[in-house]
């Protein structure tokens, strides 16, 4: 690997930014493929970049199908996927440890200090910033799932706006069909009408459960399915 490209790779790894090193086996030419850009001396076709990004999202290194000839190899360098949960409610208390067990780097965001406590969320990273500030600081990317659970538009809406403006692979929001219809109306007024199809609402797979822990299971199952279906 050439020095300049190696320095870029080291910088991406230090920033915990997902990156795939694509190598042409015939001559060793290489490119770095991220979720939003490509760099390096190796020119890649659009379909090759798309396939590399699919592998990157699933963290699956392997050969790329290049015009029927397996001459390109993608080596994925991916940190743990992240889950940002807005609202330190009962569902979050169950979802956060489940997601951590599934390999997600979890952050719970809730400026309501009575909710966002170590006693309620032991061992979980908690941010008491307002969601828009927290999202900007966290830097949402294609390895991030965002789940809003507060049921309070003052918290959920800014988080959804930030998530829909990012490449987050999953965006989910708690609430009934009626609640979501009102949410859609508000976010449409905010100019996000063309992105609202990305919101999974009511959040989670329809498993029939109603208890907080059952809802948490359904959310995590949907997040996992969405991650690998990409």
Image (cartoon, rainbow, N blue to C red):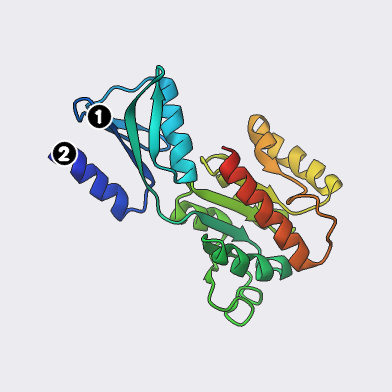
Mark 1 surroundings within 10 Å by alpha-carbon count, few (fewer than 14), some (14 through 19), many (20 or more): few
Q: Position of residue 150 (x, y in %)?
A: 70, 61
What x and y, as percent, mark residue 148? Answer: 66, 55
Q: Is residue 196 left or right of residue 8?
A: right
Which residue reaches farthest top? 67
Cα distance between the residues tagged 2 and 1? 20 Å
Q: Residues within 10 Å of mark 2 (few under 14, many from 20)?
A: few
Q: Who's the residue at 71% across and 60% down the image?
A: 217
Decide if residue 51 is in sight here: yes
Q: Residue furthest bottom?
A: 119
Quadrant that contains the C terminus? top right
Secondary-structure class at tag 2: helix
Asked if residue 99 lies left or right of residue 16, the reply is: right
Mark 2 or 1, which is nearer the eye?
Answer: 1
Where the N terminus falls, by quadrant? top left
From the viewer's side, name the closer residue of 72 and 169. Answer: 72
**Tag 2–tag 1 contact (CB < 8 Å):** no
Query: Residue 8 location in percent, x, y?
Result: 23, 43
Instruction: Tell whether 51 sits left or right of 177.
Output: left
Toward the viewer: 185 or 201? 201
Whether residue 60 is situated above or below residue 134 in the rendered picture: above
What is the residue that sits farthest to the front in this orientation? 69
Q: Residue at x 65, y 29 (%)?
A: 194
Callout 1: helix, strand or loop?
Answer: loop
In this orientation, which residue lies closer to the viewer: 128 or 73?
73
The residue singled out by tag 2 in the image is 4
- Image coords of residue 146 (percent x, y): 59, 52
Q: Which residue has dot 1 on it? A: 25
Residue 82: which disc? Answer: none
User: Relative to 200, does residue 73 appear above or below in the rendering?
Assistant: above
């Amino acid at each position: 690997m050439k020095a300049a490209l190696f320095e870029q790779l080291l910088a991406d790894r230090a920033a915990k930014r997902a990156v795939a090193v694509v190598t042409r086996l015939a001559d060793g030419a290489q490119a770095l493929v991220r979720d939003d850009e490509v760099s390096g001396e190796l020119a890649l076709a659009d379909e090759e970049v798309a396939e590399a990004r699919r592998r990157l999202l699933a963290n699956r290194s392997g050969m790329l199908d290049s015009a029927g000839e397996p001459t390109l190899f993608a080596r994925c360098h991916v940190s743990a996927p992240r889950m940002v949960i807005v609202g330190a409610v009962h569902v979050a208390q169950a979802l956060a440890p489940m997601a951590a067990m599934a390999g997600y780097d979890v952050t719970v965001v809730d400026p309501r200090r009575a909710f966002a406590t170590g006693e309620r969320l032991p061992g979980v990273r908690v941010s008491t910033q307002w969601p828009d500030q927290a999202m900007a600081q966290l830097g949402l990317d294609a390895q991030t799932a965002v789940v809003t659970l507060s049921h309070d538009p003052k918290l959920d809406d800014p988080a959804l706006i930030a998530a829909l403006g990012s490449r987050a692979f999953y965006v989910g929001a708690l609430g009934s069909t009626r609640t979501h219809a009102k949410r859609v109306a508000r976010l449409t007024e905010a100019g996000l009408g063309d992105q609202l199809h990305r919101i999974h609402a009511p959040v989670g797979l329809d498993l029939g459960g109603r208890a907080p822990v059952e809802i948490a299971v359904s959310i995590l199952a949907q997040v996992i399915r969405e991650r690998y279906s990409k």
